[in-house]
Image: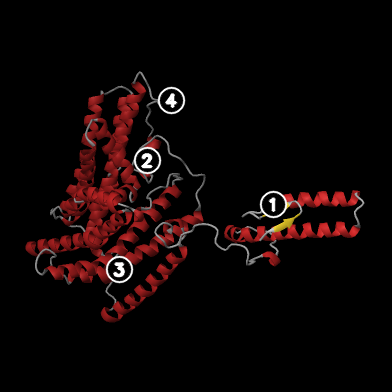
Amino acid sequence: MEILDSGGVTTPTENGGADLDTLRRRKERSDSSVAGSDTSPSDGAGARDRIDSAVNDVQGTTNLAGENEIRESGGGGNVDVRYTYRPSVPAHRRVRESPLSSDAIFKQSHAGLFNLCVVVLVAVNSRLIIENLMKYGWLIRTDFWFSSTSLRDWPLFMCCLSLSVFPLAAFTVEKLVLEKCISEPVVIFLHVIITMTEVLYPVYVTLRCDSAFLSGVTLMLLTCIVWLKLVSYAHTNYDIRTLANSADKASPEVSYYVSLKSLAYFMLAPTLCYQPSYPRSPCIRKGWVARQFAKLIIFTGFMGFIIEQYINPIVRNSKHPLKGDLLYGIERVLKLSVPNLYVWLCMFYCFFHLWLNILAELLCFGDREFYKDWWNAKSVGDYWRMWNMPVHKWMVRHVYFPCLRRNIPKVPAIIIAFLVSAVFHELCIAVPCRLFKLWAFLGIMFQVPLVFITNYLQERFGSMVGNMIFWFTFCIFGQPMCVLLYYHDLMNRKGTMA
């Protein structure tokens, strides 16, 4: 479309702003010239009409060109419908991608698709639950949560309570070195004795007592948490002493002191890395805490339902996955993978999101990055860096970088970090089972080659390949295989003892 005037030809641009201003100025000059000249009124009126028409045309074009932008940005404003969607205005003005194309899929919001997946999962699994109940009946035992046999676990409960002695012992050591009553080598020796005793004592109690598996796992998890906290407490205080006593301090404000209050807060706080003070939230939201507790109870009950109604029958009706028919073993592993995945996701949500946030809220603990978006992990290494942030920060702070500072190469430092993790995974499972087959240890150490393989595949083929391998190794193959291996080895041990 062209606008013809005595001054030349004007073509509207995409925004039309410059041409519109030009026509307005011409209109003002025309009005003033008509008012101050001898031109007849009819000629002045005709000039004004031509310019008014041109202004309106450009305004309409401007409205048309910006209509999509107004709609896309949600902006307001009164758009004259007489000038919208005129045939002369281009409908396609820039290069765009389809929302589900590979270049744009991660730039879009997928909340609607997420809601669809939730609806489909609820519908499909509700049908499966009803079908399972109709076929097998109610399989959950009345003594699933507590029974008279649970009273046999009182030594483990007393052992849990006695673990508070070890932080007090570590505090006493730090107090003595602060008062210069003992030397630095003695401090290191005493901390080694304290941390070793803190691990060996619960292991001895668990192996000597005929306790339930759940009670043993709870005690060993608490033992590992306390051990990691004690190591961080001793290591951090050692580093603070070194900086405080050095001639060239990194910060002039660094000073070494110990406080029983700060240690008590650290032992309760949802972190494994000690520091004298933490970022704090302003207040406790009581209503929010109550809602999270309700969610915790609901999802914990859902986990118990899946374990008793699905996983236990599948495991009891299976054979050893490494003995017998290969196809039968694959079928059992695949059948176990779906309920095992649900339990694992519920466990993650209950512990890392609900419980740790509840604990942080009650203690006004400010830093609540307990996990990152590990479900988008592009490699196995990304998964281990994102899914358990308290342990990852502890490993980086007290294992990985200390190795690098001692001139240990990067790859051996990674192997050492995985070795520490593998030892504690084996400790948490093998001791309650009283079964030392090293399946958990080997499963964690198997992650080391997977880290390098998925890193290579990510660089060569893109991120989705590594993400699919991560999901397959953890949820389809790894965890169900470990469950079957430990169950059958445990049953064989009990049969041999009987």
**Mark 3 or mark 4: whose residue is earlier in sequence:** 4
Point out residue 428 in the picture as x, y percentages from the top left corner.
Answer: 22, 51
Q: Residue furthest bottom?
A: 134
Q: Which residue is mark 4?
A: 253
- Disc nearest the viewer among 2 and 4: 4
Amino acid type indicated by mark 2? Phe
Q: Which residue is mark 1?
A: 19
**Mark 2 or mark 1: whose residue is earlier in sequence:** 1
Amino acid type indicated by mark 4? Glu
Visual colour scheme: secondary structure
The CA distance from mark 4 to mark 1 is: 64 Å
The CA distance from mark 2 to mark 1 is: 68 Å
Q: Which residue is mark 2?
A: 266
Tag 2 and tag 1, C-beta contact below 8 Å = no
Q: Which mark is residue 306?
A: 3
The CA distance from mark 3 to mark 4 is: 54 Å
183 or 397, nearer to the observer = 397
Amino acid type indicated by mark 1? Asp
